[in-house]
């Protein structure tokens, strides 16, 4: 069935098609429509789920963790300040090995107030033990929610996942979305049947203490093992989804026109569609450029970057976030992934689109022109388009 | 964690949900001060039961409040809240 859906509506349909049994979420701009649409679907009798109203995002995540611990498939959605308020509970979700799936609308962090696209909110959660997907289209939102439940509920993974979509560019932009048949999705997903669950007839403890000599490091290392298994699971599930429904997204790292590329742009989120258009223009002018879209940031696509790096001269990394006092996380992590290689491509970094500032084809072209200049000695990340006096 | 039946990393489940409930894990050994209730002074108001943050006050066979020393941490809130000074905190080492 094809519908015209915004990124927000796609998230609500995704939760319904995945048959999320418990949803707890708190509304926040620009995610509010997800909560509204879920409420509509419930009111229309189309979505049988338990929606738990709460007083904050912190409580929303606590409710999802609890529901997941008794064996329910759970869903939530948030954005920006709400995600930051959840931060403590994000650690609880991964540490408890609860496969909660969440949609996060990438919105800038205040102050000054900004409700526009910026990935700082989710990048700041990179050490919480959550799988992180970044979506480029409304269609990819629905498809990735399905894939995420399969990955997260894999007994060798058992981790939560957040899917990010850029504020407004995706959350409020409508496009045709193809919803696969429910019965085929049911067969693809199955039901969530954890080995260990909380059950009042068979009481267990949750949230107990581990002394330093007991099992704390071991439990933490198990999370890392789950992430390592997730690399394979994400690739496998994406391929399987593609064979069933005709759409797949390159697993962790989505490569576009990289076969003969000298220069490859690295980016994530909605700007990647603009980059595709810019690549077409540049290609027609004889510039051999491609794109490596970071579809999954955690686990980091280390091996995929190393494989890519063998054949390219330079990587141009675009961050829609910035780690103050350092540089954008994508820039840092791409360089870290390539460090063990003896023959590394040149890696240049640009901070772009901060706080929702528009990224146009011209923006991408100017970045490529800048990075193609030989021996500029650029190592620090450049902020693109700052409104300085001389400009 | 109880550590029961767990010898090494490979024995651990992924989830830190333990195999037993808190009925098995006694936590009263943390206590340094012990509340002792005087039945002569007690008026059965139930304040100690209401205020105990660890659900460690129960009703004994005569209907008086009593302390579950398996879980009481000795925080002293019951003694502080008792309107009739019926609860005395005694040092564990002195008992």
Image (spheres, coloured by chain):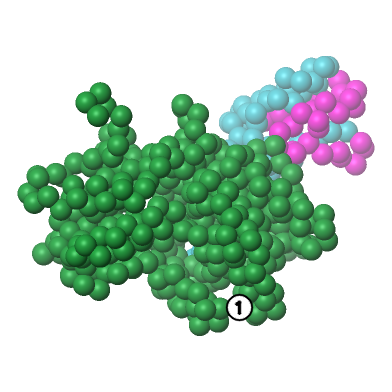
Chain colours: A green, B cyan
Quarter placement of the C terminus of chain A: top left
Residue at left offset 19%, top offset 41%: A380
Q: How many marks?
A: 1
Residue at left offset 65%, top offset 50%: A34
Q: In which image quadrant can residue A124 be found?
A: top left
**Where A184 falls versus A290 (above or below)?**
below
Q: Inspect this view and state whether residue B25 appears.
A: no
Residue A72 image position (x, y, % from top left):
69, 62
**Where A345 falls versus B51 (above or below)?**
below
- Queried whether the magenta region covers residue B1, the answer comes back as no
Q: Give the range drawn in magenta.
A: B34-63
| Nearer to the camera, A176 or B52 | A176
**Where B36 falls versus A90 (above or below)?**
above
Question: Hey, which residue is sitting farthest top in the picture?
Answer: B84
Residue A110 image position (x, y, % from top left):
48, 30
Side of A318 where A19 appears, left or right: right
Residue at left offset 77%, top offset 53%: A40
**Where A345 falls versus A319 (above or below)?**
below
Residue at left offset 79%, top offset 56%: A42
Mark 1: secondary structure: helix
Q: Which residue was labeled with disc 1? A: A188
Q: Report the magenta stretch's main SS.
A: loop
Quarter placement of the N terminus of chain A: bottom right
């Amino acid at each position: 069935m094809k519908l015209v859906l915004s990124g927000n509506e796609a998230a609500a349909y995704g939760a319904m098609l995945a048959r999320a049994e418990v949803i707890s979420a708190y509304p926040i701009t620009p995610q509010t429509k997800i909560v509204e649409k879920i409420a509509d679907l419930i009111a229309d009798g189309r979505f049988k789920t338990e929606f738990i109203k709460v007083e904050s995002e912190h409580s929303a995540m606590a409710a999802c963790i609890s529901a997941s611990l008794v064996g329910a498939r759970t869903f939530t959605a948030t954005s920006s300040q709400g995600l930051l308020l959840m931060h403590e509970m994000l650690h609880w979700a991964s540490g408890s090995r609860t496969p909660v799936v969440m949609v996060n609308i990438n919105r800038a962090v205040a102050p000054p107030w900004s409700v526009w696209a910026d990935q700082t909110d989710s990048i700041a959660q990179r050490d919480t033990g959550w799988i992180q997907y970044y979506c480029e289209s409304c269609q990819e939102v629905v498809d990735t929610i399905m894939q995420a439940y399969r990955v997260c509920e894999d007994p060798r993974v058992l981790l939560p996942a957040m899917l990010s979509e850029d504020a407004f560019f995706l959350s409020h932009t409508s496009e045709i979305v193809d919803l696969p048949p429910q019965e085929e999705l049911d067969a693809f997903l199955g039901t969530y049947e954890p080995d260990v669950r909380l059950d009042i007839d068979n009481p267990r403890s949750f949230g107990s203490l581990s002394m330093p000599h007991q099992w704390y490091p071991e439990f933490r290392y198990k999370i890392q093992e789950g992430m390592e298994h997730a690399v394979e699971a994400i690739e496998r599930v994406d391929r399987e989804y593609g064979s069933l429904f005709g759409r797949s997204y390159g697993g962790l790292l989505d490569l576009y026109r990289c076969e003969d590329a000298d220069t490859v742009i690295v980016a994530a989120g909605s700007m990647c569609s603009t980059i595709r258009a810019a690549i077409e223009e540049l290609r027609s002018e004889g510039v051999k450029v491609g794109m490596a879209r970071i579809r999954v940031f955690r686990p980091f696509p280390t091996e995929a970057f190393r494989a890519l790096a063998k054949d390219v001269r330079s990587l141009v990394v675009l961050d829609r976030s910035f780690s103050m006092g350092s540089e954008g996380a994508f820039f840092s992590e791409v360089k870290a992934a390539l460090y063990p290689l003896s023959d590394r491509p040149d890696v240049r970094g640009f901070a772009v689109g901060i706080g929702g500032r528009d990224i146009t084809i011209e923006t991408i072209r100017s970045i490529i022109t800048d990075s193609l200049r030989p021996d500029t000695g650029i190592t620090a990340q450049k902020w693109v388009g700052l409104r300085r006096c001389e400009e | 964690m109880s550590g029961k039946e767990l010898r090494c990393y490979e024995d651990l489940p992924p989830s830190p949900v333990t195999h037993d409930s808190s009925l098995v894990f006694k936590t009263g050994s943390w206590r340094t001060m012990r509340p002792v209730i005087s039945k002569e002074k007690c008026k059965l108001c139930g304040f100690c039961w209401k205020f105990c943050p660890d659900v460690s006050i129960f009703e004994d066979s005569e209907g008086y409040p009593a302390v579950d020393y398996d879980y009481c941490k000795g925080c002293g809130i019951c003694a502080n809240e008792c309107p009739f000074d019926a609860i005395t905190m005694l040092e564990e080492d002195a008992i």
